[in-house]
Amino acid sequence: MASPLICLGQQPCGFFPRRFLCAKITAARRLRGQLGGGAEIVLFFHDSDHDPRETTTILADQRTGREARLNFAFANATQKKFSPLHAKRVLPEWHANTARQLPQFAPSAAVEAFRETRAGNVADFCLEMYRRLGWLEGVRVVRSSDPEVRRRAARVEDCFVDVPHEGELVRARRRPDGSLALHKGGAEWIELPPQETRPEQVSPTRDTRWAWMRSVIPCTHYVAGRGEIQYLDPAAAREAEIVPRDEVADADRAEPCPCDHATA
């Protein structure tokens, strides 16, 4: 029999990881210990998501406890609202300004990791920070933006497609008739010109993500967050054992402390 493969999925969730991601990794590491040393942990890093709210980093002032919500700055409105996270550019001035603020919110090791991190886009920056803080030690990362992953993945009709628009790469919804559009909010959409697309441009929706992901990551166990458990298709439980993430206080708050159990 093949060795167990433990998977967890997550969008980039702040330049410091949110506690719910740390709780998923902790649960996966404990499960690996229970299953034996041959089990592999894979993070399905869904950096094709475009929602800028996903990278909001919630921190508390170390002296007053006051909560602050920090996020990346974006080059323009199109990029902020519609570009996938792997295409939202990191602005040098944002990096410098945020580095000056961080000492009041994070320990020195985390601040130094932030200052040393250089990346061209938001997804790369988050991933590098998680690595520097030790959360990805012993974890293989598979990215939904990877062209090779997209070529290997199962075809899904309900999907998004990365296409150019107003000088930016944007994540457009493909409708059943093949037309492409950007959702402005409510009932408003921006219609895009028809164009042919290739598998390398495709990423799944929430409802097709499980089948798409498992076609490239045939996991035997999946560590799921609270929200995921609510919308996962019941068929998922027949294809892999669904394991709830660990419970953690203030799950949305960022975890700026380096991981102290990376090899557990």
Image (cartoon, helix red, strand yellow):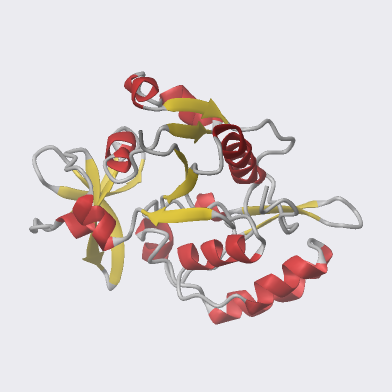
Horizontal relation, residue 106 to residue 3: left or right: right
Q: Nearer the viewer, residue 247 or 216?
A: 216
Q: Quadrant of residue 235?
A: top left
Horizontal relation, residue 58 to residue 129: left or right: right
Res. 10 visible in picture: no
On-image quarter of the N terminus: top left
Name the residue at 81% across, 69% down: 108
137 to 6, vertically: above or below: below
Res. 151 visible in picture: yes
Give the x, y percent position of residue 138: 56, 55
- Furthest residue to the right? 63
Horizontal relation, residue 250 to residue 31: left or right: right
Q: Nearer the viewer, residue 174 or 110?
A: 110
Give the x, y percent position of residue 153: 23, 47
Give the x, y percent position of residue 194: 9, 56
How many numbered discs, if any? 0
Q: Nearer the viewer, residue 151 or 37?
A: 37
Name the residue at 67% across, 44% down: 19
Name the residue at 31% across, 39% down: 214
Name the residue at 52% across, 77% down: 91
Give the x, y percent position of residue 58: 68, 51
Q: Quadrant of residue 37?
A: top right
263 to 240, vertically: above or below: below
